[in-house]
Amino acid sequence: MATIKAAILGFGTVGQGIYHVVNEKRAQLKAKLGVELEIVKILVRDTKNERVPGTAALLTDSIEDVLAVDGLQVVFEAIVDEEPAFTYLKRAVEQRCHVITANKVMFAKRGMELQQLAKTKGVHVGYEATVAGGVPIIKTMKNILLVNDVSRIQGILNGTTNYMLTKMRQENWSYDEALAEAQRLGYAEADPYNDVSGQDAFKKIMVLCDLAFGEQPNWDDVDVIGINTLTTEQLEDAKAKGLRYRHVAEAEKREDGTIVAKVAPQLVAPDHPLYPIDDVFNAVAMETNYIGTLTVTGPGAGMYPTASVMVEDYAEIIGKRAGFTVSI
């Protein structure tokens, strides 16, 4: 049976999750795809730190070692920043490797460029994990766009801020108390700026703009407002009125073709699709011309939700190449 050789770039939470999912689902993937998937290299900063037992022989701190693997076909990327992630993936695509990424920062800026290059090389780019973790919003939107037009997107795209707003409403916690608990549970980083400021959600809504509208608004024209502007009194007042604050990332294509976007706390009523979404869950509501409003929800982050959709991207890519559809 043929073997597909793959590499993982970055071996933090998501990278380790990919390794575990690939090994746990090895037999199932083999049965459904008819090929074996083998992780042959893992790019890390410190090769002396064997984070997962049994991986020492796979570790390298050189992208040259990764790209030198004979017959390398798939690259999973789980690096945090735009660079060196984009450069690494561009080189992999140029070598005709399929690439699968969870990097929203890089993809919001360079995703269209990477996909255009991949098209010229006859390979695929999987990016389901760049938006909303385990929520299959990219795949769902791609299917919808085959027939429907999407005119508006509203989403809860950051689990940290949604958890904090939930606790501030339910438990009457202050902003600082909610943040401290989110950090204790591992939902928020030691430096929570990207989450609480709205920058994380902003990058994700830009990825969705590219997919839904084929372009993004000018980033300088997008208002990005964090949840630290909210007071306990505002949340209590909203609760008394039966309303809830959600940190909403939204984008709309107007009739004149103009795309507008915003990230900010919004009051939503019980009939709003984002009203019941609590804790670390994410949700995306899409307004379409034929279906109406469709909402997709699920866990927004974490090792296994994110890693599993990346492996699903792999299965879909290999399935497309073989001419059939795969679900795992």
Image (cartoon, rainbow, N blue to C red):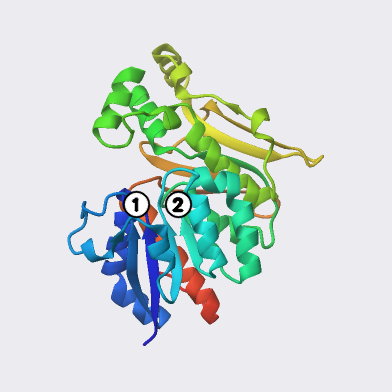
Which residue appears farthest toward the bottom when viewing the image?
1
In primary-sequence order, the first of circles 2 and 1 is: 1
Residue type at mark 2: give it: Ala
For label 1, the SS is: helix
| Left or right: 109 as drawn, with respect to 150 | left
| Left or right: 295 as drawn, with respect to 287 | left
Locate residue 181: give its quadrant: top left
Which residue is pictured at 25% across the width and 35% down the height?
185
Looking at the image, residue 298 lies above or below residue 68: above
Q: Position of residue 99 (x, y in %)?
A: 49, 62
Q: Position of residue 51 (x, y in %)?
A: 22, 53
For label 2, the residue is: 102
In the image shown, does 207 or 296 lie closer to the viewer?
A: 207
Q: Position of residue 197 (x, y in %)?
A: 47, 26
Tag of residue 14: 1
Which residue appears farthest toward the left when viewing the image?
53
What's the distance in space between the residues labelled 2 and 1, CA to CA? 8 Å
| Tags 2 and 1 touching, CB below 8 Å | yes
Which residue is pictured at 52% across the width and 81% down the height?
322
Residue type at mark 1: give it: Val
